[in-house]
Amino acid sequence: MKILDGKALACKLEIHIQEEVRELNKNFIYPTLAVILVGDDPASASYVKMKSKACERVGMNTLTFAMPSETREERLLEKIAKLNEDEKIDGILVQLPLPKHINTSKILAAICPQKDVDGFHALNVGRATLGFECFIPATPLGVMHLLSEYEINLRGKDCVVVGASNIVGKPLATLLLNAGATVSVCHIDTKDVSLYTKMADIVFVGVGKPNLITADMIKEGAIVVDIGINRLENGKLVGDVDFENVAPKCSFITPVPGGVGPMTIATLLQNTLQSAKTKLKR
Ligand code: GUN
């Protein structure tokens, strides 16, 4: 069994990004990410902090706009409109989930697709489906980078994605399909998830349930990619996979922490860099 070391790869990518940022700085381009955080969800606040710290590590500018949970939708739309127009801003990220009174689709649709470093705008989702160049959501793209680093070829592989969210499951399934895999997507209404996981060469899971994937659900030699992040009552951070019992059956497996999480952050930086680089062509 080999560990898919996301932490190591993310470090490597960050060094490369830092070098590219320095090169852009020589051309008076200063990559800048704007992050909007609405409300006081502690998990969201902690993710936002990790993202801005990562920006600082690679020399990118980051602006965080913290807004109270009772912020009205119009106010948020105004903020996005301003950031869309601001030449200095290369990427705009609205941390999800948003408070219930705000229409998430409307907010995501308001972000200029050329600054949508999260890849959540319908235009980017559509372009990703067609295999065109676009911003791709950080978590699924991070997963693809990680597989590629370990030379895991997806063509013809039987893959199952457990979890069908717009942020992770659906875009990941699209990327896998475009890479030549045969893809099943399981979700909350799937009758028997194990029917799919038992057959799969590669299992991806990101639903937020500790120990959802147990050893009996995995075929010998399979690859397991754990995208879940859960904090247990004792403070321990775990994924959705019963790592201890599943790992011995796997050819490759991601740890939590240190697997997909760091890759998500590194990929967000890459997307922001990609956006800033378009200024070179102007
Ligand atoms: N909430 C959980 N994951 C993400 C993400 O990748 N981007 C944003 N904007 N919000 C999230």
Image: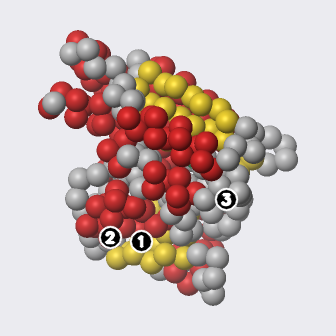
Q: Position of residue 211 (x, y in %)?
A: 70, 62
Decide: is 221 above or below 68. Answer: below
> From mark 1 to mark 3, how far is it between C-alphas?
19 Å
Secondary structure, mark 1, is strand
- Asked whether, in this view, residue 208 is left or right of residue 76, the answer is right
What amino acid is at disc 2? Leu
The residue under the point 60% across, 79% down is 193
Look at mark 3 in the image and give the residue it sits on: 208
Amino acid found under the numbered disc labelled 1: Cys
Cα gap from disc 1 to disc 2, whole angstroms = 9 Å
Q: Earlier in the sequence, mark 1 or mark 2?
A: 1
Q: Residue at x 42, y 71 (%)?
A: 159
Tell me: is circle 2 under 8 Å from ligand 1: no
Q: Which residue is mark 1?
A: 159
Q: Which SS class for mark 3? A: loop
- Tell me which numbered mark, 2 or 3, is placed earlier along the sequence: 2
**Residue 177, numbered label:** 2
Quarter location, residue 177? bottom left
Asked whether residue 132 is in view, the answer is yes
The secondary element bearing badge 2 is classed as helix
Would you identify the image quadrant in which residue 171 lies? bottom left
Query: Furthest residue to the bottom?
Result: 191
Left/right placement of residue 261 relative to residue 244 reads left
Q: Camera-side residue: 44 or 254?
A: 44
Q: CA distance from mark 2 to mark 3?
A: 23 Å
Nearest-to-viewer mark from 1 and 3: 3
Q: Residue at x 59, y 75 (%)?
A: 187
